[in-house]
Amino acid sequence: MKNEDVMNLARKRGFLWSSFEIYSGSAGFFDYGPLGATLKNRVMEKWRNYYLVREGFYEIESPTIMPEEALKASGHVDHFNDAMTQCKDCMDVYRADHVIRDSTGKEVEGLENQELTEILSEEKIRCPKCNGHLTHVWSYNLMFQTLIGAKGKKTGYMRPETAQGIFIPFKRLLRFFRGKLPFGVVQLGKAYRNEISPRQGMIRLREFTQAEAEIFVDPHDKSHPHFHRVAQDILTLYPASCQESGAEAIQLTAEKAVMDKVVASELLTYQLCLARSFLMELGLSEDVLRFRQHMSTEMAHYAIDCWDVEVYTDRYGWIEVIGIADRTDFDLKSHSNYSKEDLRVFMEYPEPLTIKKLVLKAKMGKFGPLFKGDAHMILKALEEIDAEAIQEALDDGGVYQLELQGKVHKITSDLVDFQVVEETLRGEKIYPHVIEPSYGIDRIVYSVLLHSYTQEDDRSYFKLPVEVAPVGVSIFPLVNQEELATVAQEILEDLRNQGITAEKDTSGTIGRRYARSDEIGVPFAVTVDHTSLEDDTVTIRERDSQEQVRVAIDDLPQTLHLLLSGKKEFKEFEARK
RNA sequence: GCGGCUGUAGUCUAGUCUGGUUAGGACUUGGGCCUUCCAAGCCUACGACCCGGGUUCAAAUCCCGGCAGCCGCACCA
């Protein structure tokens, strides 16, 4: 299997290995070795180039440990928490709420374990499979719990996603962006989930790296100013409807996907295109990529639309590497409710709005003496009520009955006047909607390794794009002789001083060295041969084609810069030869 | 979490059933020789019985427990 070959090579050459090996390891944790860490950093660098430089977003960094309240608001404390029960006979494990719902039809989400245990025994619920007895209900929370502070009185959790770190300081961020929508904030960092049984290598980790962007937008404007740039991109879409009917994925241009409302908005579609372009530049081809829409059953209740960007793997099938969702105003509203902070944005209308409105004015001379202490409270209550409704009631029966805290107050026409006033509205306060692309960096790195792995004849290597290859160039003396080795060493130092990642290898024969260099995906190799000693030229060999061109040693740094930045292709140099 | 199978250098593996000499080989890797372009050859070196306990004069080998991996079941907001 390709997965095995790739993971073996990745382990052997210092990309990836499972963590804590000398203590017999721990499932769900991976180390990035020297080349893996570099590769991952280059992928993240590229991501930053997309979202910070090109989209103009800003990055923040928040703590990985979060206090309980913050995760209460986000719903993670209550809903990340599965109530489990197990059959004492067949040992099958179930979610307690599912068993109860299936057997009694009761929706019991959110009840305490104690209550669920009681329901199980009162309703005499047995194992749905073998009718055996079920154990008491226990919680399995997917978050790692910890204690904050010396006395350990405050519960904290390792964050299960980086997104919350952006929602929480929203007020500060809004101020930073001077109060204007849309704006985007990103965070790259570790997130933690204590998976029950992670047995899928790099695919299901207990500690993983996310790159998330939260794009705060006007709910009424989900367009993107640069949509035309991606309008003709062809997307492989697998909408919920196709999944339900068992149909194949469909291919549409981005423009058509928006027009036909296959994807909910232009902005969301733009994000799909961005993700596609990002993955393709990492060497993933179109035929291993697709966008799968969440089915209504799997989508969070508050989301308008959600698409998983999936990559095909031989070992695990289609895997989600990026999730792109329109989360609406759920997160900000929820944090607003819990924190009592107003997390709305004042949206100014293009033109101030002038409206004519009927307003009730109390005649305080009569009103005050009549209601005495309650007068103030009644006035406040009347302000909340549409004045026209009151006027109507007075015209009809001469009295408007206001019920307040169990008391009925009679408002008669001699107590109030009505006036038409003009009011100017400059805008309104709204909760922005959030578009969230969430990238699983580890899965992307795995996909890049998997799909760049190439076997040709008897050589196998990672065909990594020049942009992310951990080492840019290998320097070899053709044979291991001192004069050649000296030149090679000089070139190595020169290139390193010019900011190029270079390695030298003098061991074994030249063929072996090429093979070793290819294996870790070094795109170019420079060979110092005897001609070099005569005319100060060397050859550059390209990894993929194994072709060589000869260049002057003096031109080497500049040539390699062009090649490694992707500004020039190797073929162009060949043509000149 | 449950059940089944498995665990010997970086990798692949012999040996385990039937306990007994210095745990053998191949590839890889380091050093050297040779070598004027794609893992050639020669010399040489490094390197392992998953961890803990038990049985025994003696444990890689038998027994128990743990850990990890694979497969199946379950779980995956």
Image (cartoon, coloured by chain):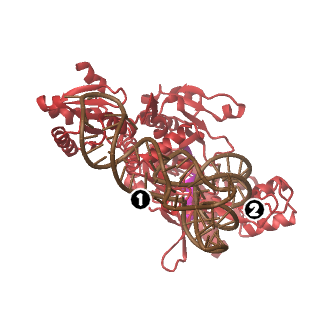
Quadrant of residue A336 within the rendered picture: bottom right
Residue A126 left/right relative to B31: right
Which class describes the residues within 10 Å of circle 1: few (<14), some (14-19), or many (20+)? few
> Which chain contains the residue that carries disc 2?
A
Tag 1's secondary structure?
helix
Mark 1 — residue? A172
- Under mark 1, the amino acid is Arg
| Rendered colour, chain A | red
Q: Which residues are magenta?
A: A325-339
CA distance separating discs 1 and 2: 44 Å
Quadrant of residue B16 within the rendered picture: bottom right
Residue A57 left/right relative to A375: left
Point out the frontmost of discs 1 and 2: 2
Question: Which residue occupies the foreground of this view, A384 or A64?
Answer: A64
Prevailing secondary structure class for the magenta stretch in the rendered image: helix
- Under mark 2, the amino acid is Thr
Residue A85 tag number: 2
Q: Indicate the position of residue A149 as horizontal and vertical percent values.
A: 48, 76
Say which residue appears at 49% left-offset and 41% top-offset.
Answer: A6
Q: Is residue A178 above or below residue A115?
A: above
Which mark sits nearer the N-terminus, 1 or 2? 2
Indicate the quadrant containing the N terminus of chain A: top left, top right, bottom left or bottom right.
Answer: top right
Q: Is residue A250 magenta?
A: no
| Rendered colour, chain B | brown
Residue B65 left/right relative to A471: right
Q: Indicate the position of residue A26 as horizontal and vertical percent values.
A: 55, 59
Asked whether the residues under the numbered discs 1 and 2 touch, taking CB atoms below 8 Å apart as contact, a structural biologist would say no
Q: Indicate the position of residue A14 as horizontal and vertical percent values.
A: 41, 48
Q: Are marks 1 and 2 on the same chain?
A: yes
Which class describes the residues within 10 Å of circle 2: few (<14), some (14-19), or many (20+)? many
Q: Is residue A26 above or below residue A282?
A: below
Tag 2's secondary structure?
strand
